[in-house]
Amino acid sequence: MTGTTSIRESSTVATDFVSFAPTEITGDRVLAAIDVGTNSIHMVVVKIQPDLPAFTIVDREKETVRLGDFNEETGGLSEAAMERAIAALKRCCAIASSLKAEDIVAVATSAVREASNGSAFVERVYDETGLAINLISGTEEARRIYLGVLSGVEFNGEPHAIIDIGGGSTELILGTGEPHRFLSSTKVGAVRLTAQFVSTDPISEPEFSTLRAYVRGMVEPNTTGLKSHLQPDEPVQLMGTSGTIECLAAIVASDRLGLVPDPLNGFQITYEEVSRLVETLRRSTYAERLEMPEMSPRRAEIIVAGAVILHETMGLLNADSITICERALREGVVVDWMLTHGLIEDRMQFQKSVRQRNILKTAKKYKVHLDRSGRVAQFAMDLFEQTRGSLHSWGTLEKELLWAAAILHNCGHFVSHSAHHKHSYYLIRHGELLGYTETELEAIANIARYHRKSAPKKKHDNYRNLPTRYHRQMVTHLSALLRLAVALDRRGIGAVESIQCSFDADAHELTMAVRAAHPGDDCASELWNLNYKKEYFEQVFEVKLLARLVD
């Protein structure tokens, strides 16, 4: 019995995104989506029907844990807040399990993103609950909120502005139901501003004036940016999501109708009603606010700041009214999951390849030579496929992250040739690429960072930023593949046409047959570079690499 495995040549094109599609989903699936926010943890459990495609909400869960109550000395999440959050997440996991959820997708926003110990919290949650939390940037949060709103509202091609007021940030979005026109995230949130500006009860005149002026100054650039994406005299409808806006709408509804509609979805309140409510809230004590409809103790503490954010934003947008939408980030997480699993083919088709489109857009921004990076990406894909099952067992997601890193591995040249791999890390990590979680961006940036020079080391800050051992091993393996892919295009002229690998398990040898693209070219530079760079690859996979030119 031979220990040699021969793998056929891959014919995948580096930008053929179909090759990243996961296994087709045919039967109904139950999915849980969790939003770990600054103020609350929300979960929605849905039944996904792939044949429609659509999802039905089976259950909702919400708990106010106030992660945004930072430790003032360390700038990190407090121990009490982390314990409240972990307890809530354990309950969410138990509920999801009881409803037979096959997958749980969790995302965290500004509080965890900004905390000095945010990564440690993510790792602790994983250790104690088995739940992997994905950090997302403010603009990625806005994109997913847009998806969530679109899952429940038909825009009919008309421009809609969406505002989501969270505990730590406020997102503003403009879209027509097609690709978004504008996404933004501002560091003003009900919890954050209450901690910064409110110490009196009821709020004093000086504190209220300072709060209002600060909100206006922070929000104005993004309201101006949103309006710049509207045509002259183009009408726009404003929609509001989040618990803060729903609570304000409930108070207005109770005053106007004598009851609170259930659901609030589609309920509309006017700018004048919001103006009057702000005046009422600023003169109310905590105890008086607590008596208002739909007001929880935690909400009563932060509602004044939340109301000011909404009021100032509506004023700056010249919005006469706002319509409530009960779908938001957690539903957007569900839609994004459906998109990445190939379940949405028509409506919102524009979002399907958002990840790949943003990689290519970023490559162009940083003047990446796309022909060359495309060849490197192709070799990386070939190596990945031709060693899968023999040297590694990574799947579709990891393959896509390797592709992204291969396309962008040289983007650091935009800053400087010297140490460009380190500049590539920075540009990828801080480029706010849409469609990716912060953890995925960290992985892509690290894979690109290690395409040359030093191997990953625990003393490197960027390597330590990877949240788990799984992510560190992935970076180590995939960066080793990328190094060989880069070597195969050493001269940048497309000298190598194709490669074919065979693995001898008994001898622990990987033989790579290299075929030249042009007759008479001995590919000496590429073969030399392969041998020069293969030591890292051999150490990582514990194999000997033998590369040879074939006809």
Image (tube, rainbow, N blue to C red):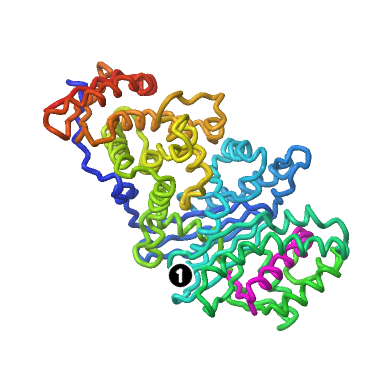
Where is residue 460 shown, x and y percent of the image? 55, 27
Residue under the point 31% across and 32% down: 485
Where is residue 214 shown, x and y percent of the image? 75, 60
Residue type at mark 1 is Gly
Report whether 359 appears left or right of 190: left
User: Quick one: 215 or 61, which is closer to the camera?
Assistant: 215
Residue under the point 63% across and 53% down: 37
Write down the quadrant of residue 337 in the picture. Answer: bottom left
395 drawn magenta: no
Write down the quadrant of residue 525 in the picture. Answer: top left
Report whether 452 appears left or right of 242: left
Query: Compared with residue 228, is residue 493 higher up or lower down, i.e. above or below?
Result: above
Check the image and name the residue furthest to the bottom. Answer: 257
Where is residue 54 shown, x and y percent of the image? 42, 65
- The magenta-colored residue range is 297-325
Query: Circle 1 sits on which residue?
Result: 177
Write down the quadrant of residue 325 in the picture. Answer: bottom right
Callout 1 crowding tier (Cα within 10 Å): few <14, some 14–19, many ≥20: many
Where is residue 194 shown, x and y percent of the image? 77, 56
Which part of the image, by quadrant, shows the N terminus? top left
